[in-house]
Amino acid sequence: MRSNRRSLAVFATMLSVGLVLTTTPLAAGAQESSELDAAFRDVIGVEGIGAPRISPDGARVAYSVSSADWDANRFDSEIWIVGPGIEAYQLTRTDEGSSGSHRWHPSGRYLAFAASRSGSRQIYTIRPDGGEAMQLTDIEGGVGSFAFSEDGMHIAFSATDAESDESKRRAKRYGGYAVEDDSFRMTHLWVIDASAEEGPRRLTEGDFTVGSFRWSPDGARIVFDHRPTPQVNSFPQADISWVDMATGEVHALVTDDGPDSGPSWSPDGAEVLYSTNAGANPYYGNSELAVVPRDGGERRVLSAGFDENPNLVEWRDEGVWFTASQRTRRALFLLDPESGEVTERLSEPEMIWSVGFSDDGAAVVVEAASRDSLDELYVGSPDDFDLQRVTNTTGRQVVDWSLGSREVITWTSEDGAEIEGVLYKPDDFDASLRHPLVVVIHGGPTGTSRPALISAYVYPVKQWLEKGALVLMPNYRGSAGYGADFRELNVRNLGVGDAWDVMSGVQHLVDQGIVDPERMGSMGWSQGGYISAFLTTNTDMFKAISVGAGISNWMTYYVNTDIHGFTRQYLEGTPWNDPDIYAKTSPMTNIAKATTPTLIQHGEFDRRVPTPNAYELYQGLQDVGVDTELVIYKGFGHGITKPKERLVATWHNWIWFARHLWGEEWELPLEDADDSLDGAESRQ
C-alpha cells in the first residue's frame, strides 16, 4: 500500500489566485511534468470496491476490488473476503483477466464466480478460506450471468449461442461481413448440476434473447425477461416469461407494451415482482415496481406514489426493499406491497449503492459513500441499522490527500427551473477572491452528479482544486433524482435548456464574487460532451471547452448511432418529419458563431456517439478559425476503459485548460516513463 502521496512542488510556482496573468505563457519543467504525471496516476489507480455479497449466515462478505494494472494496461477486478472481526483478504487471482459475479452457495461452504482463465468466461467454485479454484463449466463462447437454485443443487446460467455452422461456412467462402439489424446471436438459459456430475442442459431456445432471471423458491421454475433481439434498441419490447424445470416448457407471463424486466419472486413464490414503465416513456419516465400472479393475471403496480426510479434490492417478509436517488442522495426504502406505503429506512451514508441480506434476514451489508469517504462496506442488523464499517478503502489510500470540500448548491435557471449542483472548493478557499472555475457536466442525460470525495475519469479535478480553482458539477434538467417532471424538462429542449442550467449556475457563482469570469472552462463526456459542444457554438462565456464523445449534429447522430430510439423519444420526431427541432438542438447549427477554443476527445469505435460527430465539429471549428484539437483514442468505444489512455486523456485536458485558463504550457512527460511505471508499487 502506498501511504505516502507525492506532494506537487509544481504548484508552488503557479500563479496565485486573483493575480493578473502575464502575456508570456509559463512553461513547466520536466520534473514538474513527471511529478504531475505521478499524481494523475495515483488518482486513476485508486482502488474501488463493489458487488458485496453477504454469506447465508451473515458472518462474511465477498466483494470485488478493482485496481489499475499499469504494466498490462488494464483495470483488474478480484474477489475479496471481509467481515466483523475478519481482516480483509484477497480470495481470487486471475492473472490475465478479472474475477467477479460471485455468488455464495446456499450452504455457505463455497462461492461460485466467473472468470476468463481458459480463453472464455466460465464459472468456477472456490472455498471462502482460499485454495485452488475448480472450473465448473466449459461452454463455447463463455457464460453470462448465473445463479444457484434455492437448494443449491443446480446453477442456471445464460450463454450466447455459438456461431452456427452455416455462418462459419459463409465466412470461409465469402469472408467477413455483417447485415445491419440482422447479424447477431441470441442469449439463452442453461442449467448445470452444481456438483458437476452432469453436463449442462439447455433450457430455452427461440427468436428471443434472455436478460435477467431468478429461480423460484421451490426450484420448479425460472422466471426471466427477454427481448426480440440483443440490440439496445429492442429494450422497450422486453417481456417476462417462465420456464418449467421439469418439462422445459416456456410460458409467457407479462406481455404489456413497454419494457418489463428484472423479475423476482415474492417470499412465498406466489407472485412475481418486476420493473415496468407502466405506460411512461421508457427513456425519461419513472419506472415502477409491479407484481403479477405466478400463473398470470392482472398486474398490480406497487410504487405508483413514489416519484423516482426504484432499484429493487429484495422482497422479504417485511416488504419490498429498494434503493433510489433523492436529489444528490441515494437512500434505502421499504415498500409495503399491500398499501403501497414507502418508508425511508436508511439515509446515511448519503450515497447508498448496494444492500444485501443474509438468508435469515438478521444481517445486512451496505455499500455506501459519503462526502468524506470512498465507497466502504458496512454490516449490521436491519432492525436498527446500527452499522459497523468493515473496510478501509479511504483511510489506506487517500486520507492524507488534499481534496477540498464538497457542497450542494441551488440556483434558478433562465426559465425559472430550480437547478442543483455540486460545488467543489479547494482546501484554502478564500471567499474574498475570485477563483478560476471549471465546470464538469455529467452524461446521461439521466445521470447525477453527487458530492463524491474523488471525481476523476479523464478530468484532473483534484489537481485543479490544488491550483485554487472551483469545480462545479451541475445537475441540469433531465438528471435523475429529481422526479419524472424534471427529467422531462429537456424533451424537445435538449442543449437549449441544458445550456440555460449550466450558464445560470456559472453566473450565480460569478454574482457571488467567488469566480473570475475571465478564467472559466467547461467539459463533459457523452451527454456532457454534447452540452459542452452546444456551449461552444452558442456562447462566449467560457475561455476553453473540452467535448468528450459529444453529439455535434443530431441528424448525424441519428443515422449513425446504435440507439436511434433515444433521439426519436427526446426530440419527438425524426430528421425527416421535423428538421427544425434537429436544427434547434444541434451545436453545428450555430457553428459560425463559435469563438471558444475547443478540445475534442473521442473513442475510435464509439457506436453510441459515433466519430462523425467529432469530425464534423472539428472541421466546422477549423473552418471558422477557432482554436481546436481532435484526439481519437485508438481501439475504444464510448468510454476510455484502460489506465494508460485514461492517463493521456487526463493530460490532454490538463494541457488544454492550463494553456487557456492559466497561461501555462505543459508537455507530456516521456523521459523515464517506463521506469516510473515499472517502479509503481501495487496496493495491497
Image (cartoon, helix red, strand yellow):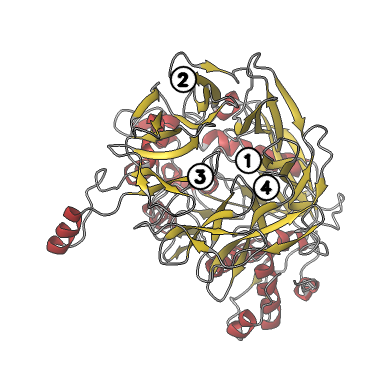
Q: Amino acid at mark 3?
A: Met
Comes first in the chain, label 3 or label 1: 3
Residue 314 coordinates in the image, percent (x, y): 62, 33
Comes first in the chain, label 1 or label 2: 2
Question: Mark 2 = which residue?
Answer: 279
Above or below, 70 relative to 638: below
Closer mark to the observer between disc 4 and disc 2: 4
Question: Mark 1 = which residue?
Answer: 448
Residue 69 coordinates in the image, percent (x, y): 58, 71
* Pointer 2 local density, CA inside 10 Å: few below 14, some 14–19, many at least 20: some
- Residue 534, can we see it? no
Q: 531 or 519, which lies in front?
A: 531
- Residue 377, can we see it? yes
Name which quarter of the figure residue 78 lies in: bottom right
Q: Amino acid at mark 2?
A: Gly
* Pointer 4 local density, CA inside 10 Å: few below 14, some 14–19, many at least 20: many
Q: Residue at x 59, y 18 (%)?
A: 304
For the N terminus, the image quarter is bottom right
Question: Mark 3 = which residue?
Answer: 153
Closer mark to the observer between disc 1 and disc 4: 4
For the C terminus, the image quarter is bottom right
Q: Is 618 left or right of 527, judged from the image as shown? A: left
Q: Secondary structure at mark 4?
A: loop
Q: Is 566 left or right of 316, judged from the image as shown? A: left
Q: Residue at x 44, y 59 (%)?
A: 121
Q: Which mark is residue 55?
A: 4
Comes first in the chain, label 1 or label 4: 4
